Image: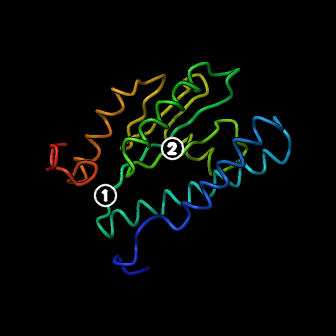
Amino acid sequence: ELSCKNISDSVLIGELTELGGKLEWSEKNLGAAEEVSYLKKYYSLLQIKDYLLTKKISTRCGVKSAFILYFYTTAENCSLCGQESLVLASLRAIYPELRVYSFDYSTELSAVKSMLQIYKIKDTELPALVIDDEVLTGFHSLEDLEVRIKESFKLLGTTPSGRINDAPTS
């Protein structure tokens, strides 16, 4: 409900970044402990809130953003999920306006389960991405996703960094 002139970035981005770092460390060092499961659930809910808020701001205030919902699972159950994560991290570095929300398929959370049902994502199709309501399953290269991201920005009326057709600025 804030004025659009007061919107600069998501109010949750700082907390998401901090919690994401803690979750990554916890998964590597604590494994499947109960605390890690709790952190993962809290992180997933915070991401969903940020996604809904950022989408609303984007629509209401004309803030240019593109969104990817990323569904993954453990390396033991998805050999390509780690590679897809690296591709998505590269895309985020290239396009600061890109928002990537990552959800573990096995998270026991009704909100995540609802998203899996809405997009009809099965555990045998991971990794899975949702871009502009289109579901992509299996591994997708940086080049393939970059084409889709540029198209997503064009749908919003601009390309990343406000440049027309990605033409260099002088």
Pointer 1 or 2: first along the chain = 1
Q: Is residue 1 above or below residue 146?
A: below
Left or right, 109 with reference to 166? right
Residue at horizontal 42 percent and vertical 24 percent from the top: 140
The front one of 138 and 64 is 64
Left or right, 86 with reference to 63? right
The amino acid pointed to by label 2 is Ile
Instruction: State the image quarter where residue 47 is shown.
Output: bottom right
The x and y percentages for residue 69 are 49, 43
- Closer to the eye: label 1 or 2: 1
Secondary structure beneath dot 1 equals: loop
Residue position marked by numbered label 1 in the rendering: 64
Instruction: State the image quarter where residue 147 is shown.
Output: top left
Query: Number of callouts in the render?
Result: 2
The front one of 161 and 85 is 161
Secondary structure beneath dot 2 equals: helix
The colouring scheme, among rainbow, by chain, secondary structure or one colour, is rainbow
The x and y percentages for residue 134 are 38, 37
The x and y percentages for residue 6 are 39, 78
The amino acid pointed to by label 1 is Lys
Q: Is residue 143 above or below residue 12?
A: above
Residue position marked by numbered label 2 in the rendering: 118
